[in-house]
C-alpha cells in the first residue's frame, strides 16, 4: 500500500488563518527544518513501513516550547509570564495619590472660592488624564465638555444659596446634552458614537463628583468630614500601592499587576486613620468617622483596581497601550474623583 502523501503535497501550504502558532513562529524565526529530511513520495511508493523520520521531524521543536507571545496559547505544562510589577512605578503612583489627597484636604481649609480654584486644577487633570488614557473617538469633544462642566459645577457649588447638589445635577444634564450634540455634529457622524458618549459621561460624572466636595465643605462640620474621609481614601491608595512595590501578593488577576494584600491592608489602615482623626477633631466621633472613612476607602481602592482591569482588557484585545504617564496616574486620580460622592453620602449620614 503506498504511503500517505505529506499534508503540504495533499492540500497545499497551511493557510495563514489556520497555521498552528508554533509553526508560524518557527517560520518567522528562520528556515523550517522540520521538512529537511523528507524524500519524494515516488521513492517510497512500495514501502509500507511507517515513516518514523517524517513523524520525528513533524514534532514541535521542544527547544522553542517556552517561546510564545502573550496572544498565543501557552504550551502544555507552561504558564504565560505574569506582567511584572515595577517597584519604582508603584512608589511613584503611591506618592502621586498622596499628593492629590493632601491638596484636596489642605484646600478644604481655605475659603470656598479658593477651594474651587484648587478643585478646578484637580478636575482639569482628571479630564486630561482620563481622555488620554481612555482614547475616545472624539477626544477634543470629550475634553471640552469636561472642562466646561468643571467650570459650571464649581461656580454652582460656590455661589448657590443654600448649598445643595441640585445645581450640580442641572449642570450635569446640560453637559451631557452638549456632549451628545457635539458627538453627533462631528465630521465622523455617528461612527463609534456610543463609545464616545460613554467617555463623555464618565468624564462628566468625575468632575461633578469632585465638585461635590465644595458643597460638603460649606456644611457645618463639612471641613472636618472632608479631612476624615479623604485622608482615609488617600492613605488606603498609598498603602495599597506601596505594598505592591514590596510584594504584589497574592495576584488579584494574572493580567493585573496588583496584589490583594495591599488592597486589604490599605483599606484597614485608611479606616483606622479616619477613626483617629475623628477622635482629635472637634465635632466628630471616632466610630462614625471610621465608618465614613471605611466607605470612602473601599470605593477608592475598588475604582483604582477597576482601572487596572480596564487597561489589562484593552491589552488583551490587542489595543495599543495608552500614554505611559496617563496610564499610571489614571487609577489614583479616578479613585479620588469617584470616592468624593461616597464621602459626601457617608458624611451626610454619619458625621453631619
Image (tube, rainbow, N blue to C red):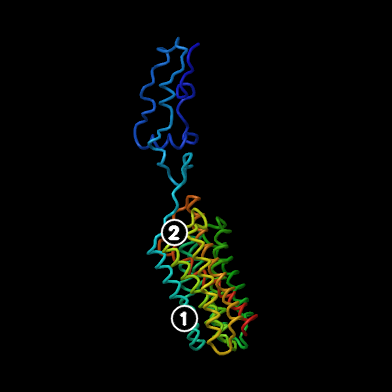
Which class describes the residues within 10 Å of circle 2: few (<14), some (14-19), or many (20+)?
A: some
Asked where in the image residue 297 lies, by quadrant, the reply is bottom right
**Residue 172 locus on image (x, y percent):** 60, 73
**Residue 237 locus on image (x, y percent):** 49, 70
Residue under the image location 45 percent in, 75 percent down: 100
Q: Could you tell whether 346 is left or right of 255 in the image? A: right
Front residue of 108 and 270: 270
Residue under the image location 47 percent in, 15 percent down: 3
Residue under numbered circle 1: 118
**Residue 77, disc:** none
Which class describes the residues within 10 Å of circle 1: few (<14), some (14-19), or many (20+)?
A: some
Front residue of 309 and 200: 309
Q: Could you tell whether 194 is left or right of 42 in the image? A: right
Q: Is residue 204 visible?
A: no
Residue under the image location 43 percent in, 34 percent down: 23
Q: Quadrant of the C terminus?
A: bottom right
Vertical arrangement, residue 41 with respect to residue 249, above or below: above
**Residue 322, disc:** 2
Vertical arrangement, residue 76 with respect to residue 154, above or below: above
Amino acid at each position: 500500500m503506498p504511503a500517505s502523501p505529506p499534508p503540504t503535497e495533499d492540500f497545499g501550504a497551511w493557510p495563514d488563518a489556520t497555521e498552528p502558532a508554533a509553526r508560524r513562529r518557527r517560520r518567522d524565526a528562520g528556515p523550517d527544518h522540520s521538512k529537511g529530511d523528507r524524500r519524494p513520495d515516488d521513492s517510497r511508493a512500495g514501502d509500507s513501513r511507517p515513516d518514523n523520520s517524517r513523524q520525528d521531524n513533524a514534532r514541535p521543536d521542544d527547544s522553542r516550547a517556552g517561546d510564545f507571545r502573550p496572544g498565543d496559547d501557552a504550551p502544555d505544562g507552561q504558564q504565560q509570564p505574569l506582567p511584572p510589577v515595577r517597584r519604582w512605578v508603584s512608589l511613584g503612583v503611591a506618592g502621586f495619590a498622596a499628593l492629590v489627597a493632601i491638596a484636596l484636604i489642605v484646600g478644604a481649609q481655605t475659603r470656598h472660592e479658593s477651594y474651587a480654584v484648587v478643585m478646578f486644577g484637580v478636575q482639569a487633570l482628571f479630564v486630561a488624564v482620563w481622555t488620554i488614557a481612555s482614547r475616545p473617538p472624539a477626544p477634543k469633544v470629550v475634553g471640552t465638555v469636561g472642562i466646561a462642566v468643571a467650570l459650571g459645577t464649581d461656580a454652582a457649588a460656590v455661589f448657590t444659596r443654600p448649598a445643595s447638589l441640585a445645581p450640580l445635577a442641572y449642570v450635569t444634564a446640560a453637559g451631557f446634552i452638549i456632549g451628545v450634540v457635539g458627538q453627533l455634529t462631528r465630521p465622523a457622524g455617528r461612527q463609534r458614537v456610543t463609545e464616545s458618549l460613554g467617555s463623555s459621561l464618565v468624564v462628566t460624572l468625575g468632575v461633578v463628583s469632585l465638585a461635590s466636595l465644595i458643597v460638603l465643605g460649606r456644611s457645618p462640620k463639612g471641613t472636618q468630614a472632608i479631612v476624615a474621609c479623604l485622608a482615609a481614601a488617600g492613605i488606603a491608595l498609598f498603602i495599597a500601592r506601596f505594598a505592591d512595590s514590596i510584594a504584589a501578593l497574592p495576584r488579584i488577576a494574572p493580567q493585573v499587576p496588583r496584589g490583594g494584600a495591599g488592597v486589604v491592608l490599605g483599606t484597614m489602615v485608611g479606616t483606622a486613620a479616619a477613626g483617629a482623626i475623628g477622635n482629635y477633631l472637634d465635632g466628630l466621633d471616632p466610630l462614625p468617622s471610621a465608618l465614613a472613612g471605611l466607605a470612602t476607602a473601599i470605593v477608592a481602592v475598588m475604582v483604582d483596581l477597576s482601572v487596572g482591569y480596564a487597561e489589562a482588557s484593552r491589552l488583551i484585545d490587542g489595543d495599543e497601550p495608552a500614554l505611559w504617564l496617563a496610564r499610571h496616574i489614571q487609577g489614583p486620580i479616578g479613585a479620588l474623583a469617584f470616592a468624593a460622592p461616597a464621602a459626601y453620602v457617608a458624611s451626610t449620614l454619619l458625621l453631619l
